[in-house]
Image (tube, rainbow, N blue to C red):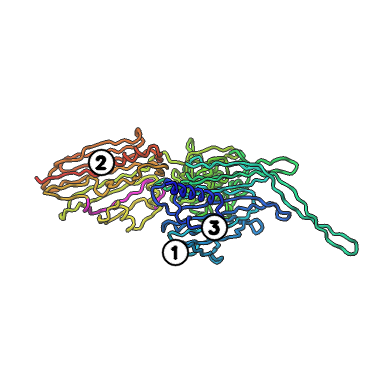
């Protein structure tokens, strides 16, 4: 027994020693047996080591260079885990002189064969380069011969001429056994750390002061007739602050259905440059309040100058507003003009890429080109319009004062007491409907004097779906239906954007009932941007009724019934993001077939969620041979917090159970 305990202690001690300093290439047999703690299922991969160290080098000719050394070792457990065998590194490329460099790459795959660790080095030819945009380049590589059970490892250096330090991601979708992050800050620059307040894991940093020595070399010509050069080296020291944290067993960020962008909950470290030392003048403070940030953005020529009234669009603008009387009519006309004139090139950005004049001339531009142009036109027409900075759903949420947290800009405009938010990049959008990609909490409206404030981006009105189904049994015993569907707001917008062909739309109308036959599908208002979308169709439902022992058992809502609860998790760590509040009303009028009468109907019921934030009303009645079923679902909130999930799940369980109850008909 004592020997077993000693062996366990030695193995733990060996791992702890290895965790402190896992050198590149030193992969042992033990790496293939490592397990993550506190997990119920085998993760797709395990990060044995994630190490990132940032330091600065001072050179006489090139000035300050930032060096970021990355070293990762990962064990692959499943086929899905093979995605970790491909690494993409994003580099900033301002121009040829100020470009981040990717250097000193070493990478290898390790496999355990007959009890021995076999290494396969990656060749330099496996590295690929791709320009993502004018400002960003991607270096990517894939580890050779990686398979389930492999351990992969790579290390590389990013050299940057910039003193801004990129964020540290300290949580993956798989567990991290050992993490080692370190920064050495020079006395010339001041930084502040920020952490994601929505993350469950917050790293704890340690700080220590130090001194770093640098060497400079100078030359001097000597001699009048026989010249020579004398070199002189001198050393000087710079005060430093080392900021570091090491930890073990970082839990995985496990995605959950309908949680939205998981990066909103990921543990990360944001390093903000707050000041730089000016020779003889102390420290220069950078923008750290919303007001100073707003003024900085407004002063950028690719932002503030783009919103000024201009001659190049004046004639077109006058043509569309000259016969419009109200401010809302003018807004709608200008909004449509911009959508017609300039098409989105699929690039985000809060700064104009081409400039509004060039975008207008060429007919395409990025988000800022289009929406800053819209603001300029609205102002030219005498309307009060301001830009609103936005962080899209896939960009996360800015949780401290920063200009870098926003990647998008939309327009705001006042009409009487109403404030409309507009995005002309989406051809199908309307005055009250932003594209769902920007429905991300709040935006920051910027006034002309640099003052700014938050505006809510989420819609406060329900998107509604009303379905009317008239149904009766045919001679074959199937249920023939004639249905009409009416969609409003975001449900209509999404339908217009999808613009399904006939086959795709028919599949959607089946609501998951693959046996249903759909015919004579007709749509109305698909080609306009305002008002509801209407869809009508005919069909045959075979799965909603069954005859047993001379009695008919019928699912009251037919193919529109909720057959399965989509919320299966026992508990959630993250909210459910429904994108917008919505309501559905389903009305079914079912004719009782000849020779039958009602034996029983499901009871009417009203289910409630969270004190009326959601409700489901289910009513049945029979009059003159027609069974009338009305089901009303109403959800006034778009976000279900984890602490409310248990109640929401039970609420949906009640809906599914009620929809599954049967109408029973018996022969007369």
Q: Which of pointers 2 and 3 lies earlier in the amino acid sequence?
A: 3
What residue is shown with label 2? 630
Residue 428: image location, x then y, percent: 43, 50
Q: Is residue 465 above or below residue 111?
A: above
What residue is shown with label 1? 114
- Secondary structure of the residue carrying tag 2 is strand
Q: Is residue 266 above or below residue 33?
A: above
Q: What are the residue bounds of the magenta stretch?
A: 527-543
* Label 3 environment density (alpha carbons within 10 Å; few <14, some 14–19, many ≥20): few
Residue 261 shows in the view: no
Q: Is residue 381 above or below residue 158?
A: above
Q: Residue drawn 55% across and 62% down?
A: 129
Instruction: Report the front residue among 408 and 173.
Output: 173
Residue 48: image location, x then y, percent: 50, 52
- Secondary structure of the residue carrying tag 3 is loop
Instruction: Report the front residue among 146 and 380.
Output: 146
Q: Which of pointers 1 and 2 lies earlier in the amino acid sequence?
A: 1
586 in magenta: no
What residue is shown with label 3? 26
Disc number lying in front (1 or 3) = 1
């Amino acid at each position: 027994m004592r020997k077993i305990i000693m062996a366990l202690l030695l193995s733990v001690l060996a791992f702890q020693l290895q965790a402190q300093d896992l050198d590149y290439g030193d992969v042992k047999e033990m790496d293939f047996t490592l397990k993550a703690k506190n997990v119920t299922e085998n993760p797709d991969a395990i990060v044995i080591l994630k190490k990132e160290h940032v330091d600065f080098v001072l050179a006489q000719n090139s000035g300050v260079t930032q060096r970021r050394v990355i070293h990762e070792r990962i064990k692959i457990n499943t086929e899905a885990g093979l995605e970790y065998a491909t690494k993409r590194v994003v580099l900033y490329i301002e121009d040829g002189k100020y470009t981040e460099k990717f250097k000193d790459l070493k990478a290898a795959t390790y496999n355990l064969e007959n009890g021995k660790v076999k290494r396969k080095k990656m060749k330099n030819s496996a590295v690929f380069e791709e320009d993502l945009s004018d400002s960003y380049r991607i270096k990517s590589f894939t580890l050779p011969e990686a398979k389930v059970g492999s351990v992969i490892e790579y290390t590389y250096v990013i050299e940057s001429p910039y003193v801004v330090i990129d964020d540290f991601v300290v949580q993956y979708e798989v567990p991290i056994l050992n993490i080692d992050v370190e920064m050495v800050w020079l006395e010339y620059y001041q930084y502040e750390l920020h952490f994601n307040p929505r993350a469950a894991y917050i790293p704890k940093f340690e700080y220590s002061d130090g001194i770093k020595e640098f060497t400079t070399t100078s030359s001097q010509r000597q001699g009048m007739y026989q010249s020579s050069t004398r070199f002189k080296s001198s050393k000087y020291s710079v005060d430093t602050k080392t900021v570091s944290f090491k930890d073990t067993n970082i839990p995985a960020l496990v995605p959950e259905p309908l949680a939205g962008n998981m990066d909103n909950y990921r543990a990360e470290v944001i390093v903000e440059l707050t000041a730089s030392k000016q020779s003889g003048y102390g420290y220069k403070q950078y923008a750290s309040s919303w007001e100073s940030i707003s003024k900085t953005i407004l002063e950028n020529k690719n932002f503030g100058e783009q919103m000024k009234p201009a001659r190049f669009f004046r004639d077109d603008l006058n043509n569309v507003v000259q016969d419009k009387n109200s401010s809302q009519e003018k807004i709608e006309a200008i909004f449509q003009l911009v959508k017609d004139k300039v098409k989105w090139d699929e690039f985000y950005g809060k700064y104009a890429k081409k400039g509004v004049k060039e975008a207008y001339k060429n007919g395409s531009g990025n988000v800022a080109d289009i929406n800053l142009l819209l603001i300029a036109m609205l102002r030219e027409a005498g309307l009060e319009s301001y830009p609103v900075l936005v962080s899209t759903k896939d960009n996360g949420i800015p949780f401290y004062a920063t200009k870098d947290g926003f990647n998008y800009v939309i327009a705001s405009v006042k009409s009487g007491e109403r404030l409309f938010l507009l995005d002309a990049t989406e051809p199908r959008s309307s005055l009250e409907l932003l594209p769902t990609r920007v429905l991300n909490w709040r935006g920051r409206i910027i006034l002309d004097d640099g003052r700014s404030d938050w505006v809510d981006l989420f819609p406060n009105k329900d998107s509604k779906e009303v379905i009317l189904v008239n149904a009766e049994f045919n001679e074959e015993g199937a249920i023939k239906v004639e249905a009409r569907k009416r969609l409003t707001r975001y449900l209509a917008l999404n339908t217009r954007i999808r613009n399904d062909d006939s086959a795709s739309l028919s599949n959607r109308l089946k609501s998951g009932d693959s046996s249903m036959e759909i015919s004579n599908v007709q749509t109305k208002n698909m080609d306009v941007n305002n008002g509801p979308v209407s869809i009508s169709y005919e069909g045959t439902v075979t799965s909603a009724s069954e005859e047993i022992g001379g009695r008919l058992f019928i699912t009251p809502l037919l193919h529109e019934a909720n057959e399965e609860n989509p919320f299966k998790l026992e508990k959630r760590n993250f909210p459910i993001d429904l994108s917008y509040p919505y309501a559905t009303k389903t009305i079914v009028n079912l004719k009782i077939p000849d020779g039958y009468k009602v034996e029983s109907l499901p009871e009417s019921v009203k289910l409630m969620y969270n004190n009326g934030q959601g409700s489901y009303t289910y009513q049945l009645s029979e009059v003159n041979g027609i069974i009338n079923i009305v089901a009303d679902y109403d959800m006034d909130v778009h976000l279900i917090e984890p602490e409310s999930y248990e109640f929401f799940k039970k609420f949906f369980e009640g809906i599914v159970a009620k929809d599954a109850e049967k109408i029973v008909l018996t022969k007369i």
